[in-house]
Amino acid sequence: MPTLGLAGDLACLQRVYRSTPSCWRPMLSSRSQKSTVIGVTFQRIQTRFPLRRPKVYIPYEALSRYAIW
């Protein structure tokens, strides 16, 4: 599933991208039967299931087509 973005939203998308692992790891730890997901295990999970980098799919030139007046 792509990370959709509008022109001007890239900074916000990058902030979410950077903060996702810090939310993802505690969530995985709460779901684990062994109670915590240690760093090595989390690195393995990130390698196997990498997060997609955010990309702006709607440039400034095309924003007027999506504007609601």
Image (cartoon, rainbow, N blue to C red):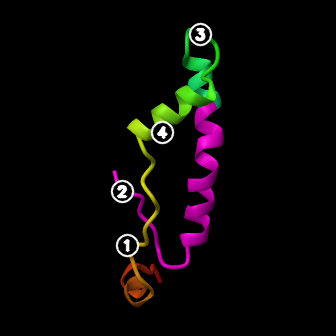
Q: CA distance from mark 2 to mark 3?
A: 32 Å
Q: Amino acid at mark 1?
A: Tyr
Q: Tag 3 or tag 2, which sits nearer the N-term?
A: 2
**Image coords of residue 34 (percent x, y):** 59, 10
The residue that appears at 36% across and 84% down in the rendered structure is 65
Q: CA distance from mark 1 to mark 3?
A: 40 Å
Q: Which residue is mark 1?
A: 57
Considering depth in this image, is 31 or 6 the residue closer to the camera? 31
Q: CA distance from mark 1 to mark 2?
A: 9 Å
What is the number of the mark on residue 34?
3
The question of residue 44 being in magenta is answered with no
Q: Which residue is mark 4?
A: 46
Q: Assess whether mark 2 and mark 1 are in contact (beta carbons under 8 angstroms).
A: yes
Q: Which residues are magenta?
A: 1-25
Where disc 2 sits, the SS reads loop
Q: Tag 3 or tag 1, which sits nearer the N-term?
A: 3
Q: Amino acid at mark 3?
A: Lys
Residue 58 falls left or right of residue 8: left
Q: Tag 2 or tag 1, which sits nearer the N-term?
A: 2
Residue 57 falls left or right of residue 45: left
Considering depth in this image, is 34 or 30 the residue closer to the camera? 34
Picture layout, residue 2 above or below residue 51: below
Q: Amino acid at mark 2?
A: Pro
**Image coords of residue 45 (percent x, y):** 46, 32
Q: Amino acid at mark 4?
A: Gln
Estimate how packed mark 3 is, as few (under 14), some (14 to 19) or many (20 or more) residues with alpha carbons within 10 Å.
few
Q: Which residue is mark 2?
A: 2
The question of residue 17 being in magenta is answered with yes
Q: CA distance from mark 2 to mark 4?
A: 17 Å
Q: CA distance from mark 4 to mark 1?
A: 25 Å
